[in-house]
Image: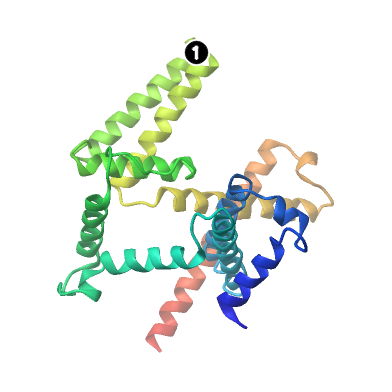
């Protein structure tokens, strides 16, 4: 037994009420859901770091989440793993008529994306915003909510108008800081973040990916500050803001030089 059949059998054994693992037996959809989200983020992290040797393991961890939920559902008489696999297979076929049907494949990726969204909209019942998962990261959910609203015409026509709204929200946040309660400040801050997500959408920027990149950049440069301080037998707590700010600039310059050198090497290799 190999592949998915082996994994399904392992999960059955782990959940067996008589001989299984007490921890696995004790789990519910609600207790496993946070792990599902965590594993999806770890897949994204491996891809962001281009850690291709880690990716099979991370994808396996994510697959396990689907198997775990499916097993609990089967025990409750709700659905099976085969139902899950068949549901996504049916969906992929229905949403790719240019591959599995009679429609032409002579379309750009952008046209195919638009067609995909049209098919999804036709499948959807209820309100415009129904089905945008509450469990998504807040930034990702903001973009999805805005995309849904934009499809029915509720959107700024131009990026300039989004920038105007951004300036307005920034001014309101500054005012809130001086005059309002902490709760009201948080509300104004949320409004500012929501407009930032909309700006990313208008500029065709992956907001979640951009923030992950900024997090990685900050981590990389701060670790370089720690390395440079360690050369003198010190740590950040033995330094001060002025010194660490100067070391930050040094780390930033080092990265720029490495990028320039890599670009030069790539250009030379291309000529050869």
Left or right: residue 67 versus residue 109 is: right
Left or right: residue 213 versus residue 246 is: left
Q: Say which quadrant the C terminus sits in.
A: bottom left
Left or right: residue 94 versus residue 239 is: left
Give the residue displayed 51% in from the left and 65% down from the top.
81
Can you name the residue that lies furthest to the bottom here? 272
Q: Quadrant of residue 56?
A: bottom right
Give the residue displayed 50% in from the left and 23% down from the top.
186
Asked whether the viewer can see residue 253, the reply is: no
Give the residue displayed 40% in from the left and 28% down from the top.
191
Residue 250 spot, x, y in % from top left: 61, 53
Q: Say which quadrant the N terminus sits in.
A: bottom right
The one of 163 and 270 positioned closer to us in this rendering: 163
Question: By what rule are the colours in the image chosen?
Answer: rainbow
The one of 235 and 246 positioned closer to us in this rendering: 235
The one of 41 and 79 positioned closer to us in this rendering: 79
Residue 100 spot, x, y in % from top left: 24, 75
Q: Write down the residue under mark 1.
A: 178
- Judge the density around disc 1: few (<14), some (14-19), many (≥20) Cα neighbours within 10 Å: few
């Amino acid at each position: 037994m190999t592949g998915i059949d082996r994994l399904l059998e392992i999960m059955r054994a782990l959940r067996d009420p008589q001989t299984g693992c007490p921890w696995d037996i004790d789990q519910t959809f609600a207790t496993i859901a946070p792990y599902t989200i965590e594993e999806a983020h770890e897949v994204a992290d491996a891809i962001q770091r281009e850690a291709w040797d880690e990716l099979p393991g991370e994808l396996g961890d994510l697959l396990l989440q689907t198997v775990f939920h499916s097993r609990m559902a089967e025990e409750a008489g709700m659905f099976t793993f085969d139902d899950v696999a068949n549901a996504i297979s049916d969906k992929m076929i229905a949403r790719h008529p240019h591959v599995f049907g009679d429609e032409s494949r002579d379309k750009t990726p952008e046209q195919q994306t638009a067609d995909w969204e049209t098919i999804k909209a036709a499948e959807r019942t209820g309100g415009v915003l129904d089905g945008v998962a509450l469990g998504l990261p807040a930034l990702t959910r903001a973009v999805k909510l805005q995309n849904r609203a934009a499809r029915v015409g509720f959107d700024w026509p131009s990026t300039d108008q989004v920038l105007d709204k951004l300036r307005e929200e920034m001014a309101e946040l500054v005012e809130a800081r001086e005059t309002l309660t902490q709760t009201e400040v948080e509300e104004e801050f949320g409004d500012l973040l929501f407009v930032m997500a909309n700006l990313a959408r208008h500029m065709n920027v992956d907001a979640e990916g951009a923030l992950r990149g900024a997090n990685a950049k900050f981590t990389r440069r701060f670790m370089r500050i720690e390395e440079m301080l360690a050369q003198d037998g010190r740590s950040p707590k033995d330094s001060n803001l002025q010194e660490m700010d100067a070391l930050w600039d040094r780390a930033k310059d080092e990265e720029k030089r490495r990028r320039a050198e890599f670009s030069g090497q790539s250009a030379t290799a291309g000529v050869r």
